[in-house]
Amino acid sequence: MAAVEIRDVRKAFGATPVIHGVSIDIQDGEFVILVGPSGCGKSTLLRMIAGLENITGGEIRIGDRVVNNVPPKERDIAMVFQNYALYPHMTVAENMGFSLKLRRAPKAEIQERVNRAAQILGLTQLLDRYPRQLSGGQRQRVAMGRAIVRDPQVFLFDEPLSNLDAKLRVAMRTEIKELHQRLKTTTVYVTHDQIEAMTMADKIVVMHDGIVEQMGAPLELYDRPDNLFVAGFIGSPAMNFIKGRIEGQGFVSDGGVTLPLARAPQGATGRRAIYGIRPEHFRLSGDGVPVQVVVVEPTGSETQVFVEAGGQEITCVFRERVTAKPGETIRIAPEPALVHLFDEQTGRRLTA
Ligand SMILES: Nc1ncnc2c1ncn2[C@@H]1O[C@H](COP(=O)(O)OP(=O)(O)OP(=O)(O)O)[C@@H](O)[C@H]1O
Ligand SMILES: [Mg+2]
């Protein structure tokens, strides 16, 4: 196992810069997830760690070694890709042992390592099958098995679950997390799925257009997003953003709706801002703000209610059941302590 240190790393394809100076410290044994919208540079950064892309600027260290010019096979990493690309003419056991065979490891050692990985992954009964005889989830596990047998310093995953159906994805998420708790191998995992990031990571790195917007523990990002981008990206359904201005101890939306603040920033009256409130941070309350119901979506465990107030659409999630019909008025109260304020120009969090 090893720590990974990414120092002011840049990448340009020809004249086009795509990574603009990214620094991330990954502790030994940590599970770090790079998350962000399509094209933000997640795979490129991962491929630079793996050595599959050269580094335009900055430095990457694995353990105490600068690896900028170290070829992939000497970096002691194992990568699992989205299309896990198993060899179709090899059995599960042969697929898993192939990299060791290439390295001319002794047969007995290969067998032992393959058996151990198979046991960890619940593949022992499937070792003699061919990839075509496996389900998608089983194939994904074989791909992980190939990485595990190499016992690398670092695992790199690039969207390994995106080919699986929703239910299997959830199951595999738990399996990968459990696997990491058992093996404690330093892991860098790329996804564009913020739920995957929230549920699996020790640390999330939110990327956007080739920069890091924020990094931290999942709940730190959820509780205290640094800016509008992170606030809107982490959490599902997404945080509501309401434009308006700070007035005394409250907030008045552009549509004229008054909303509570726990404490307004000093001397901020009249200042324009964006009021951020997560759907799950509203309560139904007799003295709340009157809003008009647009759509009610019960999921069983909770109810999503889309409402309108002062020309603004707001999404609410309630644990209790809501019987109101579209067109009716309900009263909702934001939890003032859980409100976020952002600067309208820069999108940065305003610390109240
Ligand atoms: N070989 C290449 N040549 C030129 N541009 C590239 C190359 N590979 C990637 N890019 C560009 O670099 C940027 C980052 O791409 P990257 O594949 O890292 O994004 P990503 O965050 O992994 O996106 P996705 O979620 O869609 O996989 C994109 O704008 C992409 O078009
Ligand atoms: Mg990618």
Image: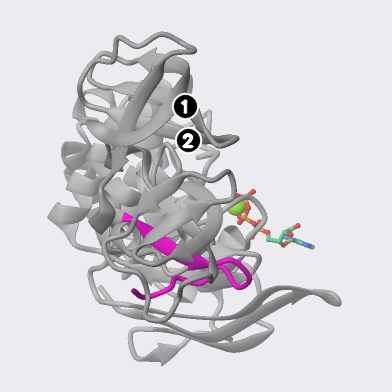
Q: Main secondary structure of the magenta part?
A: loop
Circle 1: element type: strand
Q: Is residue 1 rendered to the left or right of residue 225? A: left
**Residue 189 visible in rendering:** no
Q: Secondary structure at mark 2?
A: strand
**Dot 2 amino acid type:** Ile
Residue at x 13%, y 53% (from the top left corner):
182
| Other-residue count near label 1 (Cα within 10 Å), few / some / many at <14 / 14–19 / ≥20 | many
Vertical comparison of 38 with 310: above or below: below
For residue 226, what is the image quadrant? bottom left
- Residue furthest to the right: 15
Q: How is the image coloured?
A: one colour
Residue position for label 2? 314
Q: Residue furthest left?
A: 182
- Where is residue 82 drawn, in percent x and y? 52, 42
Q: Tell me the residue at 32%/44% (across/down).
A: 145
Based on the picture, tell me whether residue 341 belongs to the magenta stretch. Answer: yes
In this rendered view, identify the residue nearer to me: 351 or 324. 324
Mark 2 and mark 1: span between their CA atoms? 5 Å
Position of residue 56 measured from the top left corner of the image (x, y, whole percent): 69, 83
- Compared to 124, does 143 lie above or below? below
Which of the two labelled residues, at mark 2 and mark 1, occupies the earlier sequence position?
A: 1
| Cβ atoms under marks 2 and 1 closer than 8 Å | yes
Please state the horizontal and vertical placement of residue 291, each as a whole percent of the image.
43, 28
Residue 328 sits in quarter: top left
Q: Which quarter of the rendered picture does the C terminus lie within?
A: bottom left
**Mark number displayed over residue 307:** 1
Q: Which residues lie in the magenta part?
A: 339-352
Mark 2 nearby-residue class (10 Å; few <14, some 14–19, many ≥20): many
